[in-house]
Image (cartoon, rainbow, N blue to C red):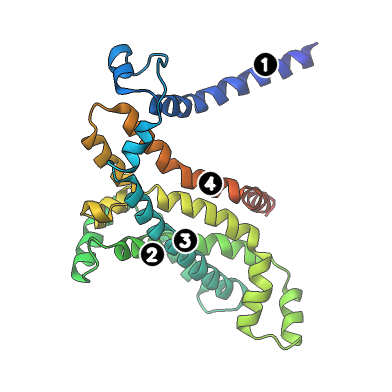
């Protein structure tokens, strides 16, 4: 009897926590399908008395969400690929070969991620102006890669370091060079970690606001997150259009997570064991 009560209490608590987490998401989705007249007459927090998808059309066309999503993907995809590629190469060198001062190098790369980004906002903005990259997507890509590379290298280093040395020795005996060992042996074995980091980095970069408003100025090059601020200014009282823009902005990250869910969970499980 006590066991059943504990199980029932646990399930009730988990249901409450799930509803608490899902509540704001459901509220935004429902709000995005209500008309302006419904919200004006009954309030934002009332039960819906209407249903429309015109809000998504307004956010997609009039709100510029299409161009903002394209800009975000043009930044996120290259930044993720460059970050994982460079991080994997750095982690491979630091974990599989005896490089002098490798621990110091790894700690310095990780220490860069411990700095609060707010203290380097002005230097990064000034540097992007001096290099002629300010207000371009290239500047945002460079910033995302530069500030995330140390973390990705550190995480991948942990995975690659624990791979058996016998695998690399066998490949060397078979005549494989450094490049072949990296691409044909180490990278396939590190795929769960790469997939987990890829899903996380896609979410972080796609949803970033701080660096976007630091090196991007014009509306035409704004990614989707700062574009939502412009959407809020453009549709001040049209809460349904703003909510529709928020839902549209969340679709790519949700799709990426669902696509890499299996690899993401396996990558976390490996990291937990190690």
Mark 4 — residue? 255
User: Is label 4 or label 3 in front?
Assistant: 4
Q: CA distance from mark 4 to mark 3?
A: 16 Å
| Mark identifier at residue 80 | 3
Quarter of the picture holding the C terminus: bottom right
| Mark identifier at residue 9 | 1
In the rendered structure, the answer to whether residue 156 lies left or right of residue 31 reads right
> Picture quarter containing residue 229?
top left
Mark 2 — residue? 146
Specify which label sits upstream in the sequence, 3 or 2: 3
User: Is label 1 or label 4 in front?
Assistant: 4
User: Is label 4 or label 2 in front?
Assistant: 4
In the rendered structure, the answer to whether residue 28 lies left or right of residue 14 reads left
Q: Residue at x 51, y 51 (%)?
A: 200
User: Is label 3 or label 1 in front?
Assistant: 3
Q: CA distance from mark 3 to mark 2?
A: 11 Å
In the rendered structure, the answer to whether residue 269 lies left or right of residue 117 reads right
Specify which label sits upstream in the sequence, 4 or 3: 3
| Foreground pick, 166 / 85 | 85
Q: CA distance from mark 1 to mark 4?
A: 33 Å
Q: Regarding mark 2 in the picture, which secondary structure is present there?
A: helix
Specify which label sits upstream in the sequence, 3 or 1: 1
Q: Where does residue 217 sit, x and y in percent of width and height?
A: 21, 54
Q: CA distance from mark 4 to mark 2?
A: 26 Å
Specify which label sits upstream in the sequence, 1 or 4: 1
> Picture quarter containing residue 163?
bottom right
Q: Where does residue 179 sit, x and y in percent of width and height?
A: 60, 82
């Amino acid at each position: 009897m006590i066991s059943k009560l504990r199980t029932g209490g646990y399930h009730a608590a988990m249901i409450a926590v799930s509803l608490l987490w899902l509540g704001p998401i459901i509220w935004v989705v429902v709000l995005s399908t209500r008309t302006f007249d419904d919200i004006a007459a009954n309030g934002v927090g009332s039960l819906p008395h209407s249903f429309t998808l015109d809000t998504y059309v307004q956010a997609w066309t009039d709100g510029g969400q299409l161009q903002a999503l394209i800009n975000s993907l043009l930044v996120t995809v290259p930044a993720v690929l460059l970050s994982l590629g460079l991080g994997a190469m750095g982690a491979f060198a630091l974990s599989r070969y005896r490089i002098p001062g490798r621990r110091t190098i790894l700690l310095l790369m990780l220490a860069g991620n411990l700095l609060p980004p707010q203290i380097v906002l002005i230097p990064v903005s000034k540097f992007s102006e001096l290099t002629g990259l300010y207000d371009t997507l290239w500047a945002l890509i460079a910033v995302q890669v530069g500030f995330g590379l140390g973390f990705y290298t550190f995480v991948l280093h942990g995975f690659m370091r624990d791979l058996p040395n016998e695998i690399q020795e066998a490949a060397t005996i078979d005549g494989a060079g450094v490049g072949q060992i990296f691409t044909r042996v180490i990278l396939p074995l590190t795929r769960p970690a790469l997939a987990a980091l890829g899903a996380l980095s896609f979410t972080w970069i796609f949803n970033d606001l701080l660096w976007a408003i630091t090196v991007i100025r014009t509306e035409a090059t704004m990614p989707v997150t700062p574009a939502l601020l412009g959407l809020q200014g453009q549709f001040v009282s049209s809460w349904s259009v703003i909510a529709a823009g928020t839902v549209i902005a969340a679709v790519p990250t949700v799709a990426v997570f669902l696509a890499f869910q299996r690899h993401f969970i396996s990558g976390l499980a490996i990291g937990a064991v190690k």
